[in-house]
Amino acid sequence: MWNPDGFLQALYEERLQDHTHDFDVGWQSKKIKQFQLLLGDFPPFAPDMKPTTIEVRENEEYTRLHLQITTYPHLKMPFYLLIPKRGIDSKSKRPVVMAIHGHGYGSKEAIGLDPAGIERSEPGIHNNFAVELVKKGVLVAVPELIGFGDRRMMKDQQYEPTERNSCFQLASSLLMMGKTLAGLRINECRRLLDYLLTREDIDGEQIGIMGLSGGGLVGAYTAVLDERIKATVVSGYANTFKGSIMDRNHCLDNYIPNILEVAEMPDLLGLMVPRPLFIESGKEDKVFPIKHAKEAYSRIKEIYRAFDAHAALEVEFFDGGHEINGKKSYDWLIRQLT
């Protein structure tokens, strides 16, 4: 009798009614500008990225570089760059995919390493997807998202990276200053794009992005805001806010104040139209439930059809949980870029 459920539902429905479902002229650019404002206003990027090589490792099928760039004053981003050896030509330019890890211990999880940097036998929910992609002949850039692994707050580094991240501290601090952790991570990925475009071995016209869960958030919205990204794979994230983020206790890095004043999640993901988009969701995913993933896909399909771009949208609802699948998405992404 005294629970607030009905009150919250009524507010949610009111917000949805405020959104127009007519894709009129200017709909896309207007929504993108509104969304960008909600992510927060960040200072200008550091003028000099100061790219630095930390380590070079040779594998049988690829070379693994560990690099860092300066994104903002007082802020550096480490990342891995995997360069394929198959059909290598030092004078050729290749497509590149940005592989964005989700919650866990950071970028090492996407390249098959444990927190100490040692190769592991179990692939985990990321299924070593950065390695699987480089084996298909494209370069793969794997950023360490701020708040995870080696980029945690000092007070959290006394714990193992598998035990604690810095998402709550970072997100709450940024929210108090009118900014979001999602916005910071997206902007840093865009700065990494700036760096990738300076490399002579990368084809700047063929850039893709793929991310899982929280990395799906960062990857998808980086693509929404940056048209340099030509194709996107969203794994274990595409859903509705109502059916996922608002339905359970998620990490604070998922929350963007006033987002429902602009759009529900499917409409945000639909802002990538007409660029190619692949969605994969596990039928047993308990974090981003399949029921609402299918609801989101139906809405995104409606948007792509409205722009006569339905052929650019693909989906796979696979037998599995909250994890990278890749059985169809890897080859799809390679096809879009080659």
Image (cartoon, helix red, strand yellow):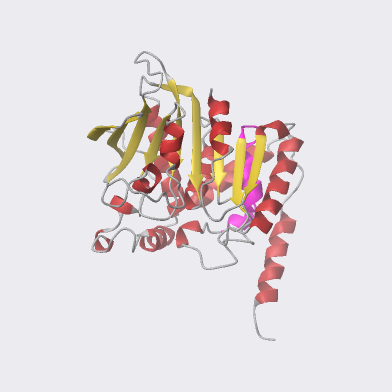
Does residue 218 appear in this view? yes
Q: Total of numbered circles in the picture?
A: 0
Identify the magenta region. 258-276
Residue extending farthest to the front is 121
- The location of residue 196, given as percent across then percent down, is 38, 29
Which residue appears at 54% of the width and 45% of the height? 325
Which residue appears at 47% of the width and 29% of the height? 136
In the image, 221 versus 104, the foreground residue is: 104
In the image, 309 versus 324, the foreground residue is: 324
Quadrant in which residue 55 is drawn:
top left
Left or right placement of residue 132 versus residue 304 in this view = left
Which residue appears at 68% of the width and 51% of the height? 296
Left or right placement of residue 18 versus residue 129 in this view = right
Left or right placement of residue 257 versus residue 2 in this view = left
- The location of residue 201, given as percent across then percent down, is 37, 21
Residue 285 drawn in magenta: no
- The location of residue 254, given as percent across then percent down, is 50, 57
Residue extending farthest to the bottom is 1
Q: Is residue 159 above or below residue 98?
A: below
- The location of residue 117, given as percent across then percent down, is 27, 47
Which residue appears at 31% of the width and 50% of the height? 114
Residue 266 drawn in magenta: yes
Picture quarter with the N terminus: bottom right
